[in-house]
Image: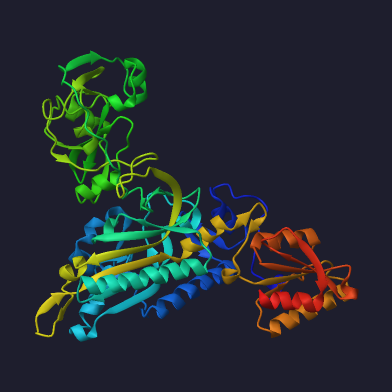
Amino acid sequence: MRVSNLFMATQREIPADAEIPSHRLMLRAGLIRKMASGVYSFMPMGYRTYKKVEAVIREEMDKAGAQELIMPALLPAEAYQGSGRWEKFGPEMFRLTDRGGRSFCLGPTHEEPFTEAVRDSIRSYKQLPVTLYQIQHKYRDEKRPRFGVIRAREFVMKDAYSFDVDEAGLDISYKKMYDAYRAIFDRLGLDYTIVDADSGAMGGSGSQEFMVKSEVGEDAICFCDECGYAANEEKAGWTRGAAQEGEELAIEKIHTPDVKTIEELCGYLNCGPDAFVKTILYNIDGKFVAAMCRGDRDINETKLGNLYDATEMELAAFADVEMITGAKVGFAGPVGLKQKIDIVVDPEVTGMKNFVVGACETDYHFKNVNIGRDFEADQVADITNAKAGDICPKCGKGKLGMARGVEVGHIFKLGTKYSDALGCIYLDNNGKEHSMVMGCYGIGVSRVLAAIIEQYHDDDGIIWPSIVAPYKVIVVPTKANDEEIMGVAEKIYADLTAAGCEVLIDDRNERPGVKFKDADLLGIPLRITVGRRAGEGIVEVKRRDSSETAEITVDEAVKAAKEI
């Protein structure tokens, strides 16, 4: 392809709304074009890389025995209503009504349509197991789209679904997908970690995420170097310390004027945050809940939401807090609530003695509060985030470390959640009916592109691994109006094209520096520069992943390009 004919518009300036390297570079290199918040077009150079990623995924899925099909993106409401997820998805689901008044959605994920397809096609155990997949656009009305294609409202996903006769069969299908995912991400050259994860709206008995390590990742990963435990922060547990010993002191109300935060209380009472228990009120599907954790901990809203199988959850409004506690925000506590609401405490709180809480009265706190004597918990559950230095929940010895990551793949053991709800059954060898046991396996295709760039870039642009580079080689003649230079460049270009190499020739009448900058920005793995020594049959070659250049013969350059 001649660069002069490329539909491409590179940018020198960094886009103002691009927050992370992959977003900036995808826009600057002209790989994507923003249509609306969280909605992007893939331009020709970006689409070429997208198709390379898609090809690797397709090859490994086919190798693992999965069969490809394609489902519609516009889906009727009935299937999601049958599984209960029409409501469960909440405002993230794009809903619409046709001219006849029938409800539809733009598919956020396709468990239900796949389950219905198998239900209507398979009756006997002899037809199982089967794994089906598609590469399809998905739609989610993200509250805060950001980071380009990493958190978008329209995105491309490879989603697969396995159907087995029992849990043992699911284990085998799950392992095949696990191995296929490792092969995919290994081939793409990604540095990734496999972590235990929350199953979220998909449900099921367990799941694992494939996380690409990145400082700008939205997800926090907890890991133990002692035993290899790794989990997404939404899922990660941690080992609580021994219960505190000592006498329970008499509860005492203390005046704390305008002291609302843990930091302010620490200074006012001259003690550490581990002496406090904070009480945070939530509105969970219209039900108010008080969540309690130690003062230096944070509530894990995913864990809390899962405890109540929440569809929508948010912090209680200021007016609701004042109505429930009788005090301004900042003075909530479990003692003296004006309304009976659920109180959920983290297990760590049950081991504390004589702690400080809000007194449900403006400008006052209680000290020497003890659970069981001064208030009762409706539930005791892990509702806090693990943090660096906590004891590993798996081995009980190692200390947890923290890192950031971008989720590129997620595999789930769904069990019979969807097959039970939608009547996806098979007959065993005795003619008895059983629900099929399902697994679900997703890869964010467009997100993988961004993750690759996050790991492979420098100040000059993208450094594509060869397997996904839009073109493998770029031939750069330094002077487009020099017949000798152009003659050598055209010959190299013709030889490589004839050999089946994906090659660009930058035949634009531009300065060499402009051409070099564009080649680096686009991340082309090998650059062959044809310049002043063209008449001697000597050209300069430079790999994109190296700062070194070498002058070699034309034949050597062509050989090196073919190897790429």
Residue 341: percent from left, percent from top: 14, 36
Is residue 315 positioned above or below 126 on the image? above
Front residue of 396 and 415: 396
- Give the residue at x 13% y 38%: 378
Residue 528: percent from left, percent from top: 76, 70
- The total number of labels drawn is 0
- Figure quadrant of the N terminus: bottom right
Is residue 129 positioned above or below 27 on the image? below
Q: Quadrant of residue 84?
A: bottom left
Left or right of residue 171, residue 153 in this image: right
Residue 361 shows in the view: no
Front residue of 201 and 392: 392
Residue 181: percent from left, percent from top: 41, 68
- Figure quadrant of the C terminus: bottom right
- Give the residue at x 46% y 70%: 184
Front residue of 101 and 69: 69
Q: Quadrant of residue 375?
A: top left
- Give the residue at x 62% y 49%: 14
Residue 507: percent from left, percent from top: 77, 71
Q: Looking at the image, which residue sits at the far right? A: 535
Residue 191 shows in the view: yes
